[in-house]
Image: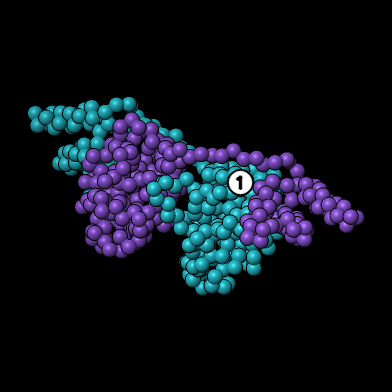
Chain colours: A purple, B cyan
Amino acid sequence: MPSEKAQPEIVLVRPQMGENIGAAARAMWNFGLDRMRIVEPRDGWPNSRAVAMSSGAGRLLDEAQLFGDLPGALADRTYVFATTARPREMTKPVFSPERAMQLAAEKVAAGEKVAVLFGPERAGLENEDIARANAIITVPVNPEYASLNLGQCVLLVAYEWMRQTGDVVHLSDDPGPKGDWATGLEIEKLAEHYEERLTEAGFFFPETKAEGMKQNLRNLWSRMSMTRADVQMLHGIMRQMVRWKDRG
Amino acid sequence: MPSEKAQPEIVLVRPQMGENIGAAARAMWNFGLDRMRIVEPRDGWPNSRAVAMSSGAGRLLDEAQLFGDLPGALADRTYVFATTARPREMTKPVFSPERAMQLAAEKVAAGEKVAVLFGPERAGLENEDIARANAIITVPVNPEYASLNLGQCVLLVAYEWMRQTGDVVHLSDDPGPKGDWATGLEIEKLAEHYEERLTEAGFFFPETKAEGMKQNLRNLWSRMSMTRADVQMLHGIMRQMVRWKDRG
């Protein structure tokens, strides 16, 4: 059974390869979307390749609704987004996935029935398909290189749906002091220095816990966001302890 | 040559399948990232399967830097993010991709050398790898279903880099009046009604332009975000025009 949560329907229009239908199902369910509609799939329906690719998200394919044409798939929808690789010469609003899913979330919350259309792998949606949409979604890709496949495009839209509606926690960070940050190599040398001396000192005891203790120490170093001065100071501390020991 | 723009290095740690390295290169370049480091690839380097999968982003593979171990790959880095499928029991800050790339953008702008680590396909990064990172990135997926592959994980991080640093335009929309929105079926019936009568009326002329004119009209209907009352009014207008003509 589909989840209770109101959400947009994801409509795959004339998808070609079953693998991509399966990949779309997985992309959707990663971000909590589980209502798929399929319009005129090239290789018929059900499709065993779609099922093979859908590992764990096969329920979405079992519950997907099949339609013979796009008007049928949109008959109960009140607001439709069409995804295109680049803005077409259409007089419709063009949204980023972020803005589109913000709007979708508002509309769904207000009881509207929303759909997002994705075109066939090779050519994308026809102008005739887009003519049935209220707005366009275009992913802001590198102008020199746009090569998102169907599954990736569904993934980004589903991810934005999650971002706009889910409980994403942004943990605060502790970026440490401003300044001359230590490099990975410097941290590594510090860790080695401490590991060597502490091994000599018999710190990593008992043997069975030694690896875990070393790892905890490395975690500590890399978590500290140290400046070069911090690293030098820590080297100095260790050197001083060794000198102290040597003096007896 | 890599692009001039300062950016994080994407570090693939012990990647297994060449196809996934190629997919990661494509994912990166879609969002303007073009600096890849590869640590101990399972099948050696260069890898023909990676090249075959990288269509159009092959330059990233040619220019990728190969390392024999992770400390080597991080030697010049000052801040390192590690991606994990779920938060590990590590005492490090855990960020969403969004927050992580905000922080990365700030750090890169301040001249820091940032890296983002991605683990092998099957098991992800080892705790020993994560111990060398300053912070963790975890994609907020559906708690019931987490199945992002390597290429998808790189894609989402690269997408967030673009969002935090690119010039993404959020076009404003015109959501129309609040109220009882027309469904797709109602819009479709309105479009058909107008098309039929306007065809009888000889509106779609000349024949060579008829299809384009019909499409423009459909674009107009779907762009209008009409309420049911709007649709009824438009039906009424057309019926009235026909009655008027019939009266002669």
| Left or right of B102, for residue A40 | left
Residue A133 in the image: above or below residue A199: above
Counting other residues with Cα less than 10 Å from the Cα at mark 1, is it few (<14), some (14-19), or many (20 or more)? some
Q: Residue at x 37, y 54 (%)?
A: A26
Q: Tell me what residue is drawn at x 59 percent, y 68 percent.
A: B40
Please indicate, yes or no, whether residue B169 appears anywhere in the rendered image. Answer: yes
**The C terminus of chain A is located in which quarter?**
bottom right
Kindly indicate the quadrant of the structure image that contains residue A186.
bottom right
User: In the image, A25: left or right of B73?
Assistant: left
Task: Using the rendered image of the protein, determine whether residue B230 is visible from the camera's viewpoint.
Answer: no
At which x and y percent is residue B134?
Answer: 64, 49
Tell me the element at label 1: loop
Quarter of the image for residue A121 reads: bottom left
Q: Quadrant of residue B230?
A: top left
In this orientation, which residue lies closer to the viewer: A106 or B182? A106
Judged left or right of residue B180, residue B88 is: right
Which three-letter amino acid code belongs to the residue tagged 1?
Thr
Q: Residue beneath label 1, please?
A: B91
Q: Residue A88 location, x and y as percent? A: 40, 48
At 23% across and 39% down in the image, what residue appears? Answer: A76
Q: Which of the pair A112/A13 is nearer the observer?
A: A112
**On screen, residue A213 above or below A171:** below
